[in-house]
Amino acid sequence: MKEKIVTEIELFTAQYQTENRTATGWAKPIVGFADAGDPIFKILRRAVSPAHLLPRELLPAAKTVIAFFLPFEKLVGRSNIKGELASQEWAVACVETNRLIEALGEHLKQFFAARNYYAVTTPATHNFDKEKLVSNWSHRHIAYAAGIGNFGLNNMLITERGCCGRIGSFVTDLSVTPDVPMNEEACLYRYAMIAEKLVIIARNFKSIAVEDCYGIHHARNALTDVSILPCSRITSIGGTAMRCV
């Protein structure tokens, strides 16, 4: 059944781009599975927020949490290298991918219902405390639990296909064998490899705003100024908005 779910997500993503003539293209999705009863979800109430939901608060009979990473095509990431603000291509990709995740969620509900299972989805974005800007269902932490990737210095989830993309997740009462969280170091800076080439920490940034939870308020304000929807993985160093590259 795991293979069928992965294939369904891959096929829907490919068809969505063609049918909707989106400006954004996506590479092959990465899909991971976690046990809904895994103790790691309780840890998220300390690591993310005391209000972070547990899988069985979304679906009392939940057995599995499924996360997926939708990688942007490479030109989207490359467009985001220059300048201090997110590129137009990046902004459009975030908006279009949020819509894709919403459509995929509705499709998966029907996919599971046709097989006599339930699935509950959550929004791709805007599911956070408006004052603290902390999510009550962190897709990237869910994705970590599902073995999709590991966190980097900038607090983004780094997958085998990088971090340029969007993450979605949902819970279901279908039971499948869970994947194992990635313990290998994925951050090149932490791995002490070609650190001088990491754009995210290289260009005239003097300090890392760890105290401000990676400067998320600065980042959100910068995005709002250019009419871009907030991206949960955009952070700030030295008060200047960073972008995923």
Image: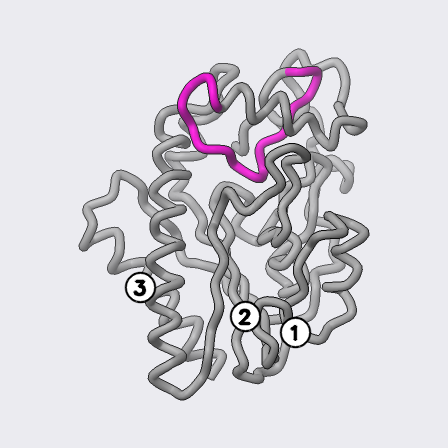
- Corner quadrant of residue 162: top right
Left or right of 182 in this view: 228: left
Q: Nearer the viewer, residue 159 or 213?
A: 213
Question: Given contact means CB atoms under 8 Å apart, are the residues at marks 3 and 2 in contact?
Answer: no
Q: From which residue to which does the magenta span run?
A: 224-239
| Residue lying at 35% horizontally and 64% vertically, measured from the top left | 106
Rendered residue at 46%/84% (across/down):
1
Q: Any mark on residue 147, and which?
A: none
Residue 213 visible from this viewpoint:
yes
82 part of magenta stretch: no
Local secondary structure at mark 2: strand
What is the three-letter code of the residue carrying label 2? Answer: Val
Dot 2 corresponds to which residue?
Answer: 171
Secondary structure of residue under mark 1: loop
Residue, x 73% and y 35% (percent of image)? 189
88 or 188: nearer the eye?
88
The residue that disc 3 covers is 12
